[in-house]
Amino acid sequence: MLTRFTINNWLSFADTAELSMLATPERQHSERVARVKPYAKVLPVSVVYGGNASGKTNFFKALHFVQQFVVQGRRPDSPIPVTPFLLDQLKRQQPSRFTVELFAEGAFYEYGFSVTCTEVLEEHLVRIGNKTEKLLFSREQGRYEFDRALPEQKYLDFVARGTRQNQLFLTNSVFQNLKHFQAVYEWFKSHLEMIGPDGRFAAFEQRFDQTKIFSDQMNRLLQHLDTGIRRLETEAVAFEDLPLPAPVQAMLHEELLEGKTLRVDGPMNSRFLLSRKAGALKAEKLFGYHAAAGGEEVRFELSQESDGSQRLIDLLPAFVDLLAEASSKIFVIDEVDRSLHSLLTQKLLDLYLASCTALTRKQLILTTHDLGLMDQRLLRRDEMWVTERNDRGESSLVSFSEFKDVRYDKDIRKSYLQGRLGGVPVLARVMEDPAVYTTGASED
């Protein structure tokens, strides 16, 4: 589980911004708050609202950057893809900082680092107990310190000396088969799932192709959401007939491994599943089936489905995973409302929250423009956040629980639209500017 994510000097966030998943003392919807050990109550959801260019997506990009940097690392001499706040000369010269607090394999950790585009300046990992904290390792300006209780001290020193300037020690330790910090690395690799506005749950193809239970669950959910689609199904097609350039087909022949499945998007939003089984490449095309008058089924190309249905098909596998009681995934979805009707988004969120209890360990973090989700009957105040950008171009992130006049019985959506909670584009000065109404034509 994610308990806190903090950034500083990243894109539009010049100063520190923090998203906390730790519950405040409020009692609303307390039945779904996870009780993690006696001293921690962790929220199952957070929704970040904000106007266009307010910083919602930049916050999403920060966590995605951290995940990619930890899991994949960087090649020798490759720049680190970090962008500080560029509208301030001093900030442009300073490092960007990131801190993630998480729960993995029965323990809480704080992991953080500061970087420029060329090197890692600082890195640390702390195990957080009920009353104490233990520094497992720290790195600063090339100097390392390790908890002396850790085994293999000489090998730790060896791995530290071999960690490049543009590489995280956490990443290199796993690459060098050290098991000391594996739980934290695996949290980023296997539990954190990032889905962008045009993205999808990466495991969709493998699970739909190989797991009938998963495809059945998806089809039941499609029907429950009243999309008109009764089921998704694949039909075999010849690999050679796929709308792929010859070099791409040759690469797939060479690199697609036995037992693996991937999705290829063709023209007109067509979708294909490719897999290698018993050495042979197998290709299937994904179709949607609708009920016609008289009970017969009619096959539709996915390109014939609405944009909303296509987006839903991309997101449904994530919600199928989240609805599982034993799920321990953290899904972070940017612009969840893209192409989706507000009521459909609410229904998905309702289904997920109804599956959350004090014992579940799954989480969902969303960014959205959808004010239909801004409802205290659906969400707690500490589960709602807002981003806004000031006149200097600096973004900030604030929890609704910090606004003193937000009561349980208050119409929070109305307060938001009146600008009392931030996040709404300021249009008054634009409308008062006479230049807005000029056509650019000059008079003789």
Image (spheres, grey):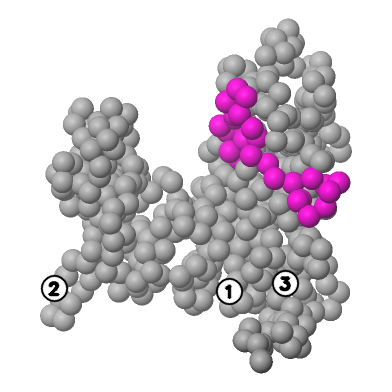
Seen from the viewer's position, the closer of residues 14 and 278 is 14
Circle 1 residues within 10 Å: few <14, some 14–19, many ≥20: some
Seen from the viewer's position, the closer of residues 378 and 339 is 339
Q: Secondary structure at mark 1?
A: loop
Image: magenta residue range: 67-92
Q: Amino acid at mark 1?
A: Asp
Q: Is residue 105 left or right of residue 212?
A: right
Residue furthest to the bottom in view is: 444
- The residue to which callout 1 is attached is 370
**Which residue does the image show at 25% across and 45% down from the upper left?**
244
**Which residue does the image show at 76% across and 51% down from the upper left?**
86
Indicate whether residue 88 is drawn in magenta: yes
Circle 3 residues within 10 Å: few <14, some 14–19, many ≥20: many
Q: CA distance from mark 2 to mark 1?
A: 36 Å
The circle on residue 423 is: 3
In the image, residue 101 sits, relative to residue 374, either above or below, namely: above
Indicate whether residue 212 is drawn in magenta: no
Q: Nearer the viewer, mark 3 or mark 2?
A: 3
Seen from the viewer's position, the closer of residues 225 and 341 is 341
**Which residue does the image show at 67% across and 54% down from the upper left?**
59
- The residue to which callout 2 is attached is 296
